Image: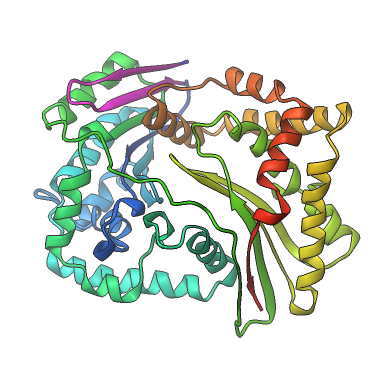
Amino acid sequence: MHQTTILPNGLRLVHQRVHGAAACCGLIINAGSRDEHEEETGIAHFIEHLLFKGTGKRKAYHVLSRMEDVGGELNAYTTKEDTCVHATFTPDHYERAIELFSDIVFHSTFPARELEKEKEVILDEINSVKDTPADLLFDDFEQLLYEGHPIARDILGNADAIRRVDREAITRFVSRNYHPARMVISSVGDIPFEKLLRIVERHFAGYPAGTPTTGRRPPAAYTPRRRDVQKATHQGHCAIGNIAYDYTRDERVPLSLLVNLLGDGGMNSRLNLNIRERHGLAYNVEAVYTPYSDTGYYLLYFGCDKANIERCTDLCLRELQRLREQPLGPLQLKRARARVTGQIIIAAENPEHVMLANGKSFLAFDEIETIDETIARVNAITPDTLARVAREIFDDGQQTTLVYR
């Protein structure tokens, strides 16, 4: 069972004590690429890299070695709406991890030499995505959906923007966004909550709260689009999707079930059975739902021979039509619920997954939904609710399509 508290400076702490040889802890900051100003494109992700490059008391090597010297791991990631630094270690090294989080988040020096070296690393990362059409398609699809809005920005940024980044721009972004009132520390491991709280207070309580708000504005009205892009690739790639519910909406649960049913990566998903197994038209086909704080989207993706793009597109649209027009029967719904609840239970056995899920939930809602509560929400889904959601989100006239051919 998890325990939570909020420090006087607004920092939130959530801990789930589990008995085991490994602990996971993360610091999640409510700041991502959508919080960049237009001239700061890519800077949130750049800063995530630079957090490892030295502080007032540690050089880059000592930051990297701090957890690895005791067999642990230190990592980080950036999304559209948050940045996370996280570590896995044995429970006797909680203080080492928490102190390191505090040091790199509040005392990174962003050395000029490291900054210039890291630019080349990120430029190489950008180029690697360009060489992977399936990955690039997902980024381009979001840009098509949210054209002109900050959430459309590529998390990695672009080459010109990265080359322009300087230390002054970095410190401005950090001072604007890296505040305890916009942070959550999430932990899963074998340590008493009271002991963990004392460690967190020791290393975080002295920093001022800062502003808890982000100043985000929601996207403008959505207009479906179609875009065809010529690519010098052997295979064609296609994404079909629509704006969907943000993560505050109750409808996100039935939509998640529908998207799971369509193509969660399993061999018996509807899209895989139809497009790959029945017709042999594509090796990779999947469905994805991504909710944000004030918007969201779903998409269907497939990669196939360029000559089969239209046929695969038609098969995808037929599956959407089936869900709009044919409510799930009792046995179908029972199997769909069992599929989702089984995945939830299995994921709950992964301490890193639980740590990140708890942290993001506390960051967004100031509360944690238990596994039993989540499963109850899944089991409460009715065929009528699924049909209503399918008619709204899978509406034939509301789909945006992006094709690489």
Q: Nearer the viewer, residue 111 or 248?
A: 248
Seen at 53% across and 20% down, the residue is: 370
Can I make out residue 267 in this image? no
Q: Is residue 13 magenta?
A: yes
- In the image, residue 239 lies at what x, y percent? 64, 62
387 up-or-down from 381: above or below: below
Q: How is the image coloured?
A: rainbow
Asked whether, in this view, residue 351 is left or right of residue 286, the answer is left
- In the image, residue 193 lies at what x, y percent? 33, 16
* Residue at the extreme right: 278
Q: Nearer the viewer, residue 212 or 286?
A: 212
Q: Is residue 283 magenta?
A: no
71 up-or-down from 10: above or below: below
Asked whether, in this view, residue 267 is left or right of residue 180, the answer is right
112 up-or-down from 341: above or below: below
Asked whether, in this view, residue 326 is left or right of residue 303, the answer is right
The magenta span reads 2-17
The quadrant in which residue 202 appears is top left
Seen at 78% across and 43% down, the residue is: 324
Instruction: Name the quarter where the C terminus is drawn.
Output: bottom right
The quadrant in which residue 326 appears is top right
Q: Nearer the viewer, residue 61 or 388?
A: 388
Seen at 14% across and 51% down, the residue is: 55
Can I make out residue 9 in this image? yes
- In the image, residue 323 lies at what x, y percent? 79, 43
- In the image, residue 5 lies at what x, y percent? 30, 18
The dominant secondary structure in magenta is: strand
The quadrant in which residue 177 appears is top left
Seen at 36% across and 41% down, the residue is: 87
Q: How many marks?
A: 0
Asked whether, in this view, residue 217 is left or right of residue 347, the answer is left
